[in-house]
Structures are given as structure tokens and as C-alpha cells.
Amino acid sequence: MTPIEGARIVLGVTGGIAAYKAAELTSRLVQAGADVTVVMTESAQRFVAPLTFETLSRRPVVTDLWERAITREPAHIGLAEWADLLVIAPATANCLGKLANGLADDMLSCLALAVKTPPLLAPAMNDRMVKHPAVKANLSLLKKRGCVIIGPARGRLASGKTGTGRLTDIDAIIAAIESALKLQQST
């Protein structure tokens, strides 16, 4: 049995062009035996429709902090209690800034503050954004707080340029998820 089999994973999808790659990640995690609930930011929904993730995960997609929860708890608390791991892929500069500064103004940012273990973050953005001192500082701070940072990778960007900013390869993200889950299971 792999660490992913039977794991309850919340996949946060933020609003960057790499959001379409999160569909493949969802599919691969489900095929590996995980229960995946997708939480999408408003911006993510401009790139990929929630129906895509609902179909691939076979679970409702959470898009709004104010949706009624299945439990009596607020939705973000109930989901935080349910999740074994929160993975945010892609994690935009905006998302990283919110997490680093404890800002919670949507479902995903509230959930990220409430989960039991630090999230696994897969940044993806333009190479100039990755190099910005604020983004670098946010990534450093999040790593110090225990977040697992995977990427970003170097390659062709949406701008047509080559640089560091691509979402890390799905296989590498899955390997990081397996490692995080193994670590949890051993403690």
C-alpha cells in the first residue's frame, strides 16, 4: 500500500495559467487511491471550471468560504479536520503572500491557516515574479514555518520566455506528497 492510497488530500488551486495542470494532478492522485477534495480560488475558476475537478475527483469542489458545510463546523474548519494534507498547486505569488502574512479572505487561505500540518506548496508564476524580493522572502518564511516548497521549475513559461517559474513536474509533486504522507504516518 502506498502512502497516497486512502489519504485525504485537499488540493488548493490558485489563479495562474498552470491551474490546468492541477487537473492532471487530481486525476493521478485519485487513480493512486486518494480521496481528493479540490478548493479553488475565484481566480483559478477563470482558468479552469470547477466541473473539471468535480468530474476528476468525484467529489464536490469548494469555491466559496460561505458555502454550507456538511458538518456543523464552518466549512474551512471541517475540511481542515478531514484533510491529511493540503497541497496548493499552483501556488501563485498572491497565495504565497497571503500565507506568509496570515491573511485569510477566501476559502483556501482560511483553510491553510486551519490545517493540522503545514501545506505542500508548488509555486508557479512568471520568472520576474519569482525573483522579486517579496516573493523570495515569502517563500523563505513559509519554508521556515515548515511548509514543503516544491519548485518552481525552469522551462518555457506562458510568456514564451524560458526561465524559472513553471509548475514543477506532476511526478515530482506526487513524490513530494508521498514523502509528506510517509513522514506523517511515521510520527
Image: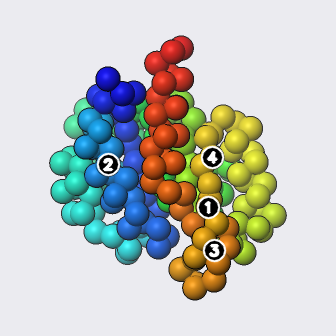
Could you give the CA–CA distance between mark 2 and mark 3, rounded to whole angstroms? 26 Å
Residue tagged by mark 2?
28
Nearest to N terminus: mark 4 or mark 2: 2
Depth check, mark 4 against mark 2: the one in front is 2
Could you give the CA–CA distance between mark 3 and mark 1, rounded to whole angstroms? 11 Å
Residue tagged by mark 3?
126
Nearest to N terminus: mark 3 or mark 4: 3
Q: Position of residue 170 (x, y in %)?
A: 45, 54
Residue shown at 58% from the left, 84% from the top: 159
Return the mark for residue 153.
1
Asked if the residues shown at circle 2 and circle 1 are in contact, with their CB atoms under 8 angstroms apart, the answer is: no
Query: Of residues 105 and 119, which is closer to you in this image?
Result: 119
Q: Position of residue 50 (x, y in %)?
A: 27, 63
Element carrying mark 3: loop
Element carrying mark 4: strand
Query: What amino acid type is highlighted by mark number 2?
Result: Arg
Nearest to N terminus: mark 3 or mark 1: 3
Residue shown at 33% from the left, 70% from the top: 48
Return the mark for residue 149.
4
